[in-house]
Amino acid sequence: MTSTTTELKVSAFLAYKFIAKGNRGTSALTILIMALAFVNLMFTTSVFDGMGDATEKQVIDTLYSNIVIEPKDEEIYIENPDSVVKKIINVPGVIGTSAQYVTGATIAYEEQSGAWSIRAVDPADERTVSTVPDMMIEGEYLSRSDTREIIIGKEIAGGHGGSLEHTSLGGVVVGDTVEVAFTNGVRREYRVKGIFDTNFIQSNQLAYVTEKELESVLGIHDMASQILVKTDTKGEEDRFPNQFVELGVHEDIKPWIVYAGIVATLTQSFDALNALTGAIGFFVAGVTIFIVIYVSTVSKRRQMGILRAIGIKESIIVRSYIFQAVFYAVCGCIAGLVIMFAILVPYFIKHPMVFPMGNVTLLIEQKAAITRSAGLIISAAIAGFLPSWRAVRETILDAIWGD
Amino acid sequence: MMGRDAQDTIIATRNLSRTYTIGKVQVQALKNVTLDIRRGEFAAIMGKSGSGKSTLLHQLGLLDTPTEGEIMIDGIEISGLSEAARTRFRLEKFGYVFQEYAILPELTALENVYLPAMALGLSQGECTRNGMDALEKVGLTERADHRPREMSGGEQQRVAIARALINKPKILFADEPTANLDSASSKQILELFRGLNRDLGQTILMVTHELEDADIVDQVIWLADGEVVGREG
């Protein structure tokens, strides 16, 4: 057996005995504190990840789907969008498309008015890329043949407890008539057919009419401002643009993330907050382990002196304390994960946090769990090393017979 | 070599001194100690409290470093050894029995005994076998799986002796090993030492302040004020 293997074996043996045959109450309390430190590290990260995930999901489900095909820079519309759709609809992974017009308009109701974005869609196609049709809180969604009917988000309608009540139309209900002034000067009255609530402040500021209706307003036909493409998995959007180009799509093809400035801003802010709370969390966990090991080394000072006297190397003793600290940290991480998955995650699924981007639950990313666990274990190892290393610095005689 | 056969000498000191600095005061605990201990000898260091008995034992047992002088152990001048080498030396060549029982409360008797063997790199099987052999020498095989709190003071001290014997040391150092024991246990421990010395030829150097212990040892080194003031045997 090599010297290093022997030392590791003796260190592990001592650590195991100190933990297994030592004070179980102290061990249990230390593991509990480590678990809480881990939960503290993971909780804020999980909330931020949950907010990011909720935002991404909302952006994809209610605003841009996974991929957006837009006209080239110099063009206003995509001509003959059906031909584009035909090229891409059979690409593996593509599960829906919706060619649509997007225009600005002023919507007025009684004394209230405001400028919002109106999308003109084929209702059947829209259902394949968006969840807005399923989010009606009053009335119903559009039908393909609808003219002079409009559906609006709750932030436009007002009266539904939105965040932008002061800029809304002040309480429009289904059946009311609103006047829409388009950018080309056309003004039309529309019956409000439905009001939707996506739980997302940005998509709740949209209004929808049928494609047929807006074409009659704009006096154009067989065009589109954008084609939204739904894919079967999130996060793999980058593999589609090249395939689309190879199939002869010459328009601009962009993944949803390009349009989601809010997500990037949130992510950057969350990363900074995560780094700060993480550093504090690691420090607190490290200090906790330091105190536990320090108290242990003080109470075992004489014992450590005797071990050294009988020829047990200092490195074996120090390593045995590092092993104990790492054991506590590993158990703390496991207990922390159990607390997260068995208690906190189910609780927040049942009672989600309400944010402007929607209902947020805890999202435990594997990467975050691994990095936080590794960080906690490294902190514990350092905190286990310092007091034991300090303790073996004193002379054997001082350790055994000192004050 | 002070009239003794160099081949037989296992411990030799020349002009050994140890001075401690306590605040601004210097205390000379040992003064020019020169002595020889023969291989297989059972020797006692005796003297009044504060005479330097334990200080001398600590120098010879490599638990402390002398201020001046030389120490030869088994023909090796040990003053030039690094700290790591001294640790290895203690593990391989020395056994220690302290006044307090000094065994780990978390370990069983057998585990306490074989810990130094484990540190020497012996396999688990060898550790257990040698550990049981050592416990047999001190008459405690039936207590192998007991933890210290389940044993009497005398039994714990015998476990400490078994631990000291596990690596077949050249020298067994004992620092007032019976000071905390009742008279029956003390007698048992001294008889054990005598038997180990007689039957196995184990060299033993023991610090004691019990005058009657002089009767069972081969040599007594008397210390007073840090100096050797007499030798018997």
Image (cartoon, coloured by chain):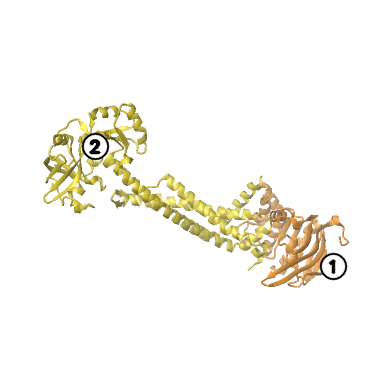
Chain colours: A yellow, B orange
Say which mark, if any, is on residue B232: 1
**Percent of width and height locating residue A359:** 30, 49
Q: Count neighbours of disc 1 (C-alpha within 10 A) and say few if under 14, some if 14 to 19, many if 20 or more.
A: few
- Please give the name of the residue rendered at 73% of the width and 56% of the height, measured from the top-left corner: B94
Instruction: Point out residue B213 in the picture as x, y percentages from the top left corner.
Output: 78, 68
Q: Secondary structure at mark 2?
A: helix
Q: Determine whether, in the image, residue A105 is placed left or right of residue B35.
A: left
Image quarter where the C terminus of chain B lies is bottom right
Q: Residues within 10 Å of mark 2 (few under 14, many from 20)?
A: some
Task: Please name the amino acid that badge 1 sits on.
Answer: Glu
Res. A334 in view: yes
Q: Quadrant of residue A233?
A: top left
Q: Position of residue B206 (x, y in %)?
A: 76, 64
Q: Is B174 in front, or is A66?
A: A66
Residue topped by disc 2:
A127
Instruction: Single out the residue that lies furthest toward the front.
Output: A74
Is B130 in front, or is A54? A54
Query: Disc 2 marks which amino acid?
Result: Arg
Is A148 placed left or right of B83 in the picture?
A: left
Out of A208 and A107, give the one closest to the viewer.
A107
Residue A212 percent location from the top left of the image? 16, 34
Disc 2 sits on a residue from what chain?
A
- Look at 29% across and 44% down and name the residue there: A58
**Please, is residue A277 above or below residue B228 in the view?**
above
